[in-house]
Amino acid sequence: AISLPVGGGCRVVNEATVHVFMNTTIVPREYVFAFYVTPPAAAPLFNELSIILRDPAGAVSDAAVSIPGSRILEKLRIREGQLLWTSTKANRVSTMTISFEVLESLPDLVVAPDQQSD
């Protein structure tokens, strides 16, 4: 199973803030985080994301701030599918498959003109 390291955890502070705790050194390309969210009906006025890594004393160790949020596409009805992976072993390559089902045909405004079918 995929999980946080021993001594880790997370806490939802409010609808816009999630704290993830890890009692280990974060090595590049070793961790991936995903959160289940429900997108709002319309893009918020402040549509940005920030990721801040802090040490145990609370000092900022690294950060990526003011990352533009994704544009919200209205009326795109989809249903989640399976999340599959081939390996959970450290230092091994794993292929992840994320699937979804489109519940209605996409309007031409969503599909790029060169990808539209007749």
Image (cartoon, grey):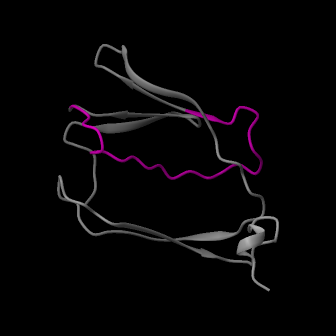
Q: Is residue 27 left or right of residue 100?
A: left
Residue 102 pos. (x, y %)? 65, 75
Number of marks in picture: 0
Region of the chain picked out in magenta, as a range = 25-49
Image point 71% across, 32% down: which residue?
A: 46
Q: Is residue 85 above or below residue 25?
A: below
Residue 38 pos. (x, y %)? 61, 53
Which residue in the rendered view is the most extreme toward the front?
114
Q: Quadrant of the C terminus?
A: bottom right
Q: Where, by quadrant of the figure, is residue 75 drawn?
A: bottom right
Q: Is residue 66 left or right of residue 36?
A: right
Residue 90 pos. (x, y %)? 17, 53
- The answer to if 47 sits in the magenta stretch is yes
Which residue in the rendered view is the most extreme toward the bottom?
118
Q: Is residue 55 above or below residue 24?
A: above
Q: Quadrant of the N terminus?
A: bottom left
Image point 33% across, 66% down: which residue?
A: 95
Could you tell me what secondary structure mostly forms the magenta stretch? loop
Residue 7 pos. (x, y %)? 21, 36
Q: Is residue 115 above or below residue 87?
A: below
Image point 65% across, 51% down: which residue?
A: 39
Q: Is residue 17 left or right of residue 10?
A: right
Image point 75% across, 78% down: which residue?
A: 105
